[in-house]
Image: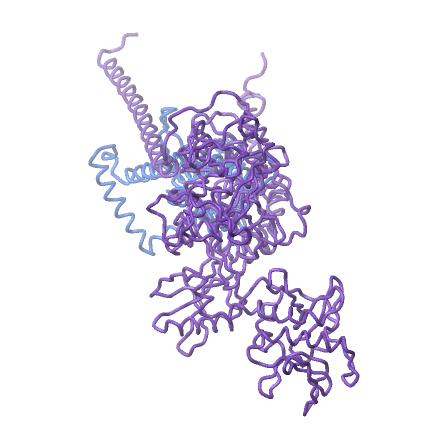
Chain colours: A purple, B blue
Amino acid sequence: MKVQPEKRENCQRGRWKKTFQIVLLLISVTIFFFVTLSISRLLEAKNQSGQKTALKLRSEEKKEWSGSQLSPLHRIPLNDEFNQKIVPVAADALPFSSRFSCEPCHSYSTVSQGSHFNFKERPAVDRRTEPWFWVDERTGIQLPVSFQKYPGFWSPEKLGLSDWKFVTLFGRHLSGGGPGEPADEFQTPDSRWNVSGKLEINCLGCHHRSPLQDHSEWVKQVMRENFRWAATAASGLGEVVGMASRLPSTWTLADGPDPDDREWAVVPQVKYNQNLFDSKNNALLDLSRPENNRCLACHSVSPRNAKSRAELERDVHLAAGLSCVDCHRNDLSHEMIRGFEGERLMRSSLKSYDYTCAGCHLGEKPEKGGYGWTGKLGAPRPTHRGIPKVHFERLACTVCHSGLLPGKEPQGVYTARANRLGIFGKAIWTSEFPLIYEPVFVREVDGKIYPERIMWPAFWAEKKGKELVPLDSEEVFRAAPEAFSLKQEVAALLNALLPLRGGDFYPAAVISDFLFEPDVDGGLKARQLEKSPFSGKQEGKQFLLVQVNDSEIIPLLPVFDPEEAPSDIEEKIQKTLENLKPLAGGRQPVFLINKYRYEISEGYLEKKEIEGEAPAEPTVGFLEGEEFQPLLSPFQVRNLVHPGAGPETLTEELVELALRKISAASPEKEFAYVAGGFLFILDKRGMLRASEHQAARAITWPLGHEVRPAQQALGKNGCTDCHSPGSKIFFGKVEARSPLKTSHRESKLGSDLMQTGPLFQFLFGVTFLFRPAFKLVLAGCVILMGLILLAVVLKITGRAAGLSGENSQRQPRS
Amino acid sequence: MLFGIFSFVLIIAISLRVTFGRYLNHLPEEKRRISLENFKSYLRWIAGWKFSFLKLSRWDRAIDYFIKWAKKNFSGWTVWVFYLMSLCYVYLASSGLFFAWFVPRGLFGFPLLLHVAAGALFAITLTVILFLKARHYLPERLNASGELSGQGFWCPLLKKSLPRIYIQAVSFWIFVLTGFLLAASTLGSMLPYFNYPAQIVFFNLHRWSAVFSVVSAILGLDSIIE
């Protein structure tokens, strides 16, 4: 059959047209995909560029590692601060200087840029760390201090804290360097660096594996202003006597010891332990990677309600045999890896992501710059079965895995640096303030939720417009001593009653349901009574004097017949009244029993008959004119019983009194007290008024430890660990605690801190009551739909294969 | 990001294609061709169409049309099942796509709660609809039905014009299949058996299924409008 040329041409044209259309379609699809992919990558890159920029402070230039995995025994000469070799037998040997002793092998200037030492210069670009806390229990101050300018953190500069003051306040938990070694231009008139010496980096504080290494000794030396001697004493290499704090500010090392004063202003001196040196005067030091105890000296945290150390749970990593520095690594730069994702302030050669939770447990894909494998340090790979993806996008790993298990409300904790833990001796170093609580879950600027610790600042301040300028605690105390020395006064009064006690008992006072007793530091501690035998008798009385021992509370004053008073009793009464004399403030101390009054007259005990109503029970007090005043004034009783056995030290009445006194000293200025999330000021009528203020808001900072075992992670028992109508996570309430006992306390729900909205979380929690039914219904639907779809697919397949329908009849087997 | 761009472009492109085809059908036969002139007038038309949606009367007409179609195809109480499914689906699609396209955080808060609740109702009603309608869209039923004639559509793959009922059937089965995948991925992510990579798979399966479900719904809707 012949095809006409015209038709053939048309056919060919049609073919070309079709080919052209197909090519055009392919090109269009390719361009579409290319453009889509390019735009999405560009946008993704732009999105991530802000997070991944690493701030490089300084790169490592010199390799100082020999290549060996061993930590050698350091048989090295120790040099003093004049770079002279120390001869331990010399009577006038100076303390060793880590700058000159370690420098020959390890660059001191490089190390001094490490994260434990250069915090003065570190910008506030990474997530917050625990600040320092300027605490004064007397005046009710707990103020967060940090060189990093995070919101709510006060810089030492703003508080007028010089390097000297900073080191004297916080040197106990400083590892030296930084503010401990200020340049000459940063030395202020209040400083005594020439006496104390510089607080050099205490290399041995972390690296010394000797059992003699003692953090408490470091603290003692720092408190005595023996800065240049502190490292030597703490290492156990030598014993240091003397106190630089007692030396005149003109003293220098060149002055040497004062031969005339061997008791009070004794110049610090070192007596080296010669067993720790060889015959060539080289010290024998076992220096290695820091042990956990060295880290825990400054970084341990414990719940306040733990009765003993045995109750504490260890971090799961430590329990598994890891050490702190396995994850928190550093090279010579001493830039510690903090171990959270997105750490920017890194200048070490190590890759910080590798040591985050995800870095060890999940690894990172090679296309994202990782190795593609996981299991670093034997980390198990988590399965996280049944946990929706959004949790990994919105929550830090630590939310479910770290910190104390969430209760109805966050628990109070002590932290080493804030509450002075890890310092051992006769005195009790642990301070009740600052009051810190954990865990609270807070949404941070990156949109993720982190478990954090929370505290509310408390301080006295001058109000300059909207700004608050914190006042120095000494200044505040001087202005209103009567408001801040209540407990000391009452403790002194009770101590004055010591002669009236018997045996191992000591005097105390019962007010309401509380027992107030003097403590060893001259303060007053309170305990709540389980059941007071005196509570019935107290009705109508303000307080009751008692004597207590470990297990018993009995009345302090013996009942006797004054008509036939035993001589030993009268002697006790005389001693008591004599002891009370200095505390009486011009009043006459007296002892009343039945219708008689004992008082001291010209050095002798005198018994007088009193007119009017006799007291029901024997009682001690003061006579002002003819008016009898009880030992504890109503003011004292009110302000003692109101805080009760709680950690608070102030009441609104005391704050009002203090503000009046401070304002009276400078009437042109306005003063305020910040506590519990509120600002307290005196209004025009002189009454205390509470209002909100930005500076009063709570501060929080993320926590990393203790990491709990996976079996104790939130969500292990299902979604309802967090999502339920009564969820502790979302509806747990944290109420501000501060040194002030007041009803004005800021409170926050968990959902407020997470910015998730309580109503939403409640409704979302309610849905979990129906979740099992929801899942069943959904499963039913999926199964039914699946079966129908399967039937359709089978039917179509059957038809296509000729197994059923028309095809099977049309094409019989031949 | 890729999902956002791709789904946005795809859905907009399908919508434009469908409306462009519908616009061409309104033109006299001799003018029905792809040309710049027609495209310009289409754009003017679509702009006017957009503004016309602000008029209540248009909504009334659209809803009337929808109700009429529903009553024609579903009898008795089943029409209410269809209404419920449609209502849930409109919310699911609009909330899901809006948050996917315009909110970096994705679906959250009260819209998420409603999304979950509407999702459950959608799954149930879709199952009922599937029970009721699956047999109507089986290939042999399609061939047996009297709807093979009438205005069709051009299938470039088969190079021939096919009846409109075919596009309805294909849309229906894609809609059912994606609905099944949507329900299955939701259920899978809630069950405590699947690990994190599986959760990622479920998440992606859910959103891609949603996109193709919307595409099938657009095509299906276009196919039922005369």
- Quarter of the rendering occupied by the N terminus of chain B: top left
The picture places residue B82, in percent across and down from the top left corner, at: 50, 47
Q: Can residue B79 be seen at all in this image of the molecule?
A: no
The picture places residue A107, in percent across and down from the top left corner, at: 42, 30
Instruction: Give the residue furthest to the left.
Output: B37
Indicate whether A810 appears above or below A536: above
Q: Nearer the viewer, residue A119 or A71?
A: A71
The picture places residue A721, in percent across and down from the top left corner, at: 61, 48
- Quarter of the rendering occupied by the C terminus of chain B: top left
Q: Which quadrant holds residue A334?
A: top left
Indicate whether A787 appears above or below B103: above
Give the total number of marks visible in the rendering.
0
Q: Which quadrant holds residue A398?
A: top right
Q: Which quadrant holds residue A783?
A: top right
The picture places residue A50, in percent across and down from the top left corner, at: 36, 39
Name the residue located 41 percent from the left edge and 59 percent from the top edge. Answer: A695
